[in-house]
Image: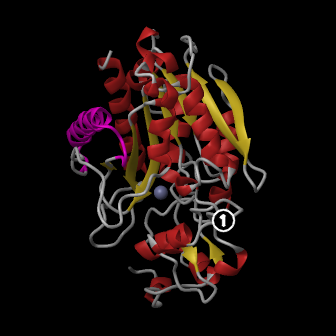
Amino acid sequence: MADTTQATDVSEGMSLATARARIPKREIPAFWVGDGGAVERCVREVKNGQVRVLARSPGEHPIHVIAYGERESPARRANYNSALGAGQPEAYMDKAARKRPVLLFVGPVHGQETEGVTGLCNLVRVMETGQDMRGRDQARLRELGLRCRLLIVPCANPDGLARFEPKSLCGMTREDIRFWGQGTKPDDTYWGWPGCKARHPMRAEDYAFLGCYFNEAGVNPMHDEFVAPMGPEAAAVLRLAADEGPDLAVSLHSHAAAPSVLRPAYAPREAQVRLSVLAKRFNDLAAARGFRHGGVPEIALDGGASPPSFNLVSALHHACGAPSFTFECPHGVTDEKAYHVGFDEILDIQFCLYEAMMRDVLVAR
Ligand SMILES: [Zn+2]
């Protein structure tokens, strides 16, 4: 807290000028991917994988997917929910008939959560060269990746990313997360989490600063209207999932605390059991590498007076049958109760998750 700009009271809100003045003078390492230009450079370097533009955002930015590993196309006679209606999941896709398991990595739908963008662009570099952007050998991760088909969407909300000026929240505070993440009301007070979700889409008169949660049209892709989409991002991700039928899918997010695999809402018992196994695998790997981690999600029924939302992760499962989950990575903020990590550790935590996911689908067959 030596930085004097942080002495100002920002507990309730701040202006964009204050938020900009609070961005610390830090050296952000070259391996960090915290803006759209760096994502574009990563995409242009792809030689071994296939790059495709899934959609364009309201702010006219492309949403890319990069695929590694040959595509196998088992016969498909029905969409997923109709196949379940028939009692024949294989009518959607006989996933077990494929030689390689398929993993879907959905990069951040929240623009300030650049930990996942950095992780996925580094995974692309690993698949291209065997080294990450730090020049460190990642042959083990690449070898696991080569046994799968990987679908990598490095950033699922490029409009939100374009609005995120600090490029990383590492070394900043929870107030900075609130400002850049959920944004501010016209009087410069925070919308905050989860209050920002009570206004959707955000209209121009609703904000002074539109948080990086939202695309340029004020839509938070995590909570789009999946049967009648308000924005192109979630719809593009769901089309990709339905088309490819992944064996496991993640939506990458970030928060202040230790890394955690979250329980998905409205997933059948079998998918919840698979994800608790995956969470244990991630936690063991993280612990072995010296990182703290969250708990293993409980197997539970959804309910309550205000039941959990059917969000993008729920929709992903119901589009393709894959166990689908939210991963929360630490930002590295400095608040007393936060998990204190630096840039290098954040990338290593992302790699722990990718390795756990690859091992999970390879063992499951
Ligand atoms: Zn998020």
Give the class, few, some or many, for how many residues have Cα within 10 Å of label 1's Cα (few <14, many ≥20). many
Q: Is residue 134 visible?
A: no
Picture residue at 26% right of the left edge, 41% below the top? 286
- Magenta highlight on residue 283: yes
Q: Quadrant location of residue 201? A: bottom right
The image shows a total of numbered marks equal to 1
167 lies above or below 71:
below
Query: Is 220 on the left or on the right of 263, as rendered?
Result: right
Q: Which residues are magenta?
A: 264-293
Horizontal and vertical percent position of residue 309 = 43, 57
Query: Is 40 on the left or on the right of 258, as rendered?
Result: right
Residue lying furthest front? 86
Picture residue at 22% right of the left edge, 38% below the top? 280
Residue type at mark 1: give it: Gly
Horizontal and vertical percent position of residue 26 = 52, 64
Judge by depth and name the residue closer to the eye, 38 or 174: 174
Q: Which residue matches tag 1?
A: 218
Horizontal and vertical percent position of residue 117 = 54, 46
Horizontal and vertical percent position of residue 52 = 70, 30
Mark 1 lies on a secondary structure that is loop
56 lies above or below 333:
above
